[in-house]
Amino acid sequence: MTTLRSFRIIALVAALSTGSLVVVAQDNSELPHSFGCSSTSAESTFNAELQRPARLQLVSATEQNEIQQAQIHPFHTSYIKIDVARYKISRIDFYIHHDRPPDAGSLPYSPLTIYVRLSVSDQFLWWKVVELEQDRPQQNLLLADLPSPDEKKPDSPATVLPATGDPTIPFFDVQWSSLQQGTSVSAVEAHILLDLRLPQPHIAADLSCNSIEAFGVCGAWDAQMQSRNNYECDWIKADHDFRCEATVWNDGVTKRQTKSWFQLLSGKDIPFSVPPGNPATLQQFAEFAERDPSWRARQIELPGLGKTSDILRLPVVEDRVIHVFGAYGDPAPFGASFFYVVLSRDHAAKLGYIPSISFFEHDPEGKARHLEATFENSVSEKQTLPTPASEIKLGGELSFGVKELFNDALTHIYQITAREDQITSGRDRMTVGGNGGRAVYWLAIEDQQSEDRTCFGMTKVASNGLSYVGCARQRTEASAAVVTIERGVSFHALVDVESSHTSTEATEGIEPPDTENGEKVEDQCAYSVDVEWNHKQWLASEPKLECGSTFSPREISIADDGAITAKPAQIESGPN
């Protein structure tokens, strides 16, 4: 949304007996209006907060003294083209006050006072915008920038626009701005969506758009590495509602975006629209690919997932066929997500999720594995994705390479390499080497389980992904550096593992262990493990440390075909 405030004001300015100025406004219907942030540009980071129900509310104003005061020297805007036959309202007036408090000091902003008057038949109905009481302290949304004390005729601090683009419909977007300072500087663009339809006018939603400039090495970097989000809502006349698109992204890190859609007034999710003739679920995708093999070469966007590829087809016993699918996973550290569908002539297609946590994951409390198991169980029980159908992931070019590592009558083991071009511009900050995400997985499919059940086991073996840990510091993921597969009657491999290390943008190279602050050298030593598939699960032996006399970290790179290369990494130089 590049130009949010597109409308033309045809204004008649007249002096009222109260001394205020009135702007009688109508918009140009050729220029539609949307409810959302006018810009997402920011020095450090940007975020938007959409609140439903709103943090503000309309309360009836009935005291005559208050009503009289509201009409003295306000910023006054009127809309006179309301569809009176449909809404029983002939005119809507907005009275906005913005006084400089005597004790404001050097603060560049002060609270707004907003009144709304509805002309209904032969009477006036008055309403006032007030803030709801909150359980916890928070910034006053009604703050607006003060004009310069030297301005004799300042402009109104708030703009009132037809939220639908049609001034005959009593929905209005009242918007204002303020510059708020603390540990960072935040330029806040605030909006309230007024639904003034009778019998109960109310504030349908409020929105704050925050453009943030952070300071200091830690503050600036932490802000730049945060996810950003935004909302864009457009009036859909046929639905009598706003269709909103929510976007979460981080253009400083990755091309990855998450988009979702919903109706603003009803709150209903809007499912991602699948093109006619395309599958809408993984089960349908597998059935399409089984009937027509050309679908296996296609990458399609599925609700709840985004770009999805059919990466493996495997016929198994009892005339069953397994299709394995790859889709976007976590952006940092880089990874993919995997699912399977089992097709059978006598049963409905069966959907499953394949957890793929690394053997080398530092997860002492089992939290990551618990989350994966919870997701897996949900997919298995409900036969659908836990992620909403209104959501989709977008990102860089995503592809998969599959290589068979082991095969006997009932055991099938594959190496799967996931590749994603994550770079937005310049150097990719979230992968070692900065040339896109690469991850290597081992997938075991065991077809000798009881009751015609197939066992799936997957583990991440290698990765060039980085995680941001704060204050301009990033951490590599523990990864296989050298893999030696031993041939035999079962799958067995010796894996030389490079531990996780920390680097910083402020200096070059890997940070050595900070032994003075309790970091242990052995926690960053290379080690080796024996890995095997026991026909039910992946097993790994106790790590065998391989600490040398000096700290010698290695940098991991992964080729498109999954080949892993380890070379000596540069170590951060100490102070001179």
Image: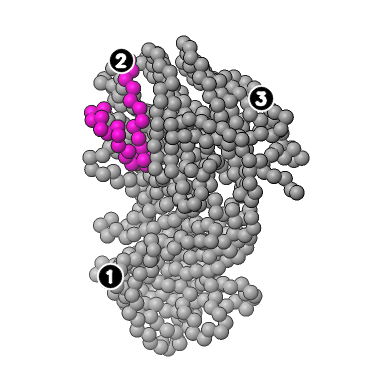
- The residue carrying mark 2 is 318
The answer to whether residue 195 is left or right of residue 459 is left
Q: Residues within 10 Å of mark 3 (few under 14, many from 20)?
A: some
* Dot 2 or dot 1, earlier in sequence: 1
Amino acid type indicated by mark 3: Leu
For discs 3 and 1, the disc positioned in front in the rendered view: 3
Residue 291 among magenta residues: yes
* Position of residue 176 measured from the top left corner of the image (x, y, whole percent): 47, 69
Q: CA distance from mark 3 to mark 1?
A: 72 Å
Q: Residues within 10 Å of mark 1 (few under 14, many from 20)?
A: few
For discs 3 and 2, the disc positioned in front in the rendered view: 3
The answer to whether residue 282 is left or right of residue 511 is left
Specify the segment rendered in magenta: 290-318
Q: Residue at x 47, y 61 (%)?
A: 41
Amino acid type indicated by mark 2: Glu
- The residue carrying mark 1 is 29
Q: Residue at x 57, y 66 (%)?
A: 180
* Dot 3 or dot 2, earlier in sequence: 2
Looking at the rendered structure, which numbered label has been put on residue 545?
Answer: 3
Q: CA distance from mark 3 to mark 2?
A: 45 Å
